[in-house]
Image: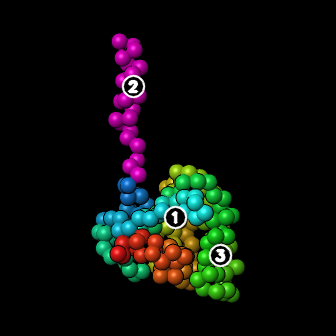
Amino acid sequence: MRRLALVLAPLAFLLAFPPARADATPPEIAARVGQAQPVGAVSFSALGFKFYDARLYTEGGADFGWDRPFGLELAYTRDISGGLLVRATMRELRRMEGRKADHPELERKIAACFRSVGAGDRYVAVPAGRDGVDFWLNGRKTCALRHPGARDRVLGIWLSDDARDPALSRKLRGIG
């Protein structure tokens, strides 16, 4: 009887507390985007290494639009330092926008948002109006970025036609 209890105890625990489904809508998005549904998903790789899977959610699975509710999830597959995330973000902004006078200020704000990540970590970004983006890492809010045009500028790295890989951006937005 004791042996049976030892076998059944872990099973009972798993049934009572099932693991979160990888394809479940992140609660940070579900709370801010009504009836959030995924519209596109892509994996980002460079130099033969996969870095993260990205998934875009919109209200009711509607077509993506900058002025409609949406949330972006990045699920990391490898370790990346917070400093590298900041540098990569700023490099993409400079590539897309050229050098702008507000980049140093924006970089300071972004640095306050990004932490180091490891395989299995998940960043979520949800716009807060045109000038804001709220970020969560593994369900914990890291910051409320507020800066002129932050939504389009920062999230445009993944969601604009000026993204490094326009075809991946279109796929992420559910186009084509």
Residue 69 vs residue 145: left or right?
left
Which label belongs to residue 58? none
Q: Are marks 3 and 2 in contact (CB under 8 Å)?
A: no
Label 3 crowding class (10 Å Cα cut-off): few <14, some 14-19, many 20+? some
Label 1 crowding class (10 Å Cα cut-off): few <14, some 14-19, many 20+? some
Look at 63% across and 65% down and name the residue there: 85
- The majority secondary structure of the magenta stretch comes to helix
Look at 60% across and 66% down and name the residue there: 113
Q: Are marks 3 and 1 in contact (CB under 8 Å)?
A: no
* Above-or-below relation of 67 to 3: below
Q: Secondary structure at mark 2?
A: helix
* Above-or-below relation of 13 to 146: above
Residue 92 vs residue 39: left or right?
right
Mark with earlier residue (1, 2): 2
Q: Amino acid at mark 1?
A: Phe
Q: Are marks 1 and 2 in contact (CB under 8 Å)?
A: no
Which residue is more in the foreground, 140 or 52? 52
Kindly identify which residue carries mark 3. Answer: 91
Which residue is more in the foreground, 5 or 64? 64
* Above-or-below relation of 17 to 165: above
Look at 67% across and 70% down and name the residue there: 87
Q: Amino acid at mark 2?
A: Ala
Mark with earlier residue (3, 1): 1
Residue 116, x across and y down, in percent = 63, 57
Kindly identify which residue carries mark 2. Answer: 9
Q: Which residues are magenta?
A: 1-22
Kindly identify which residue carries mark 1. Answer: 44
* Residue 56 in view here: yes
Residue 76, x across and y down, in percent = 54, 57
State which quadrant residue 164 falls in: bottom right
Residue 121, x across and y down, in percent = 54, 53
Label 2 crowding class (10 Å Cα cut-off): few <14, some 14-19, many 20+? few
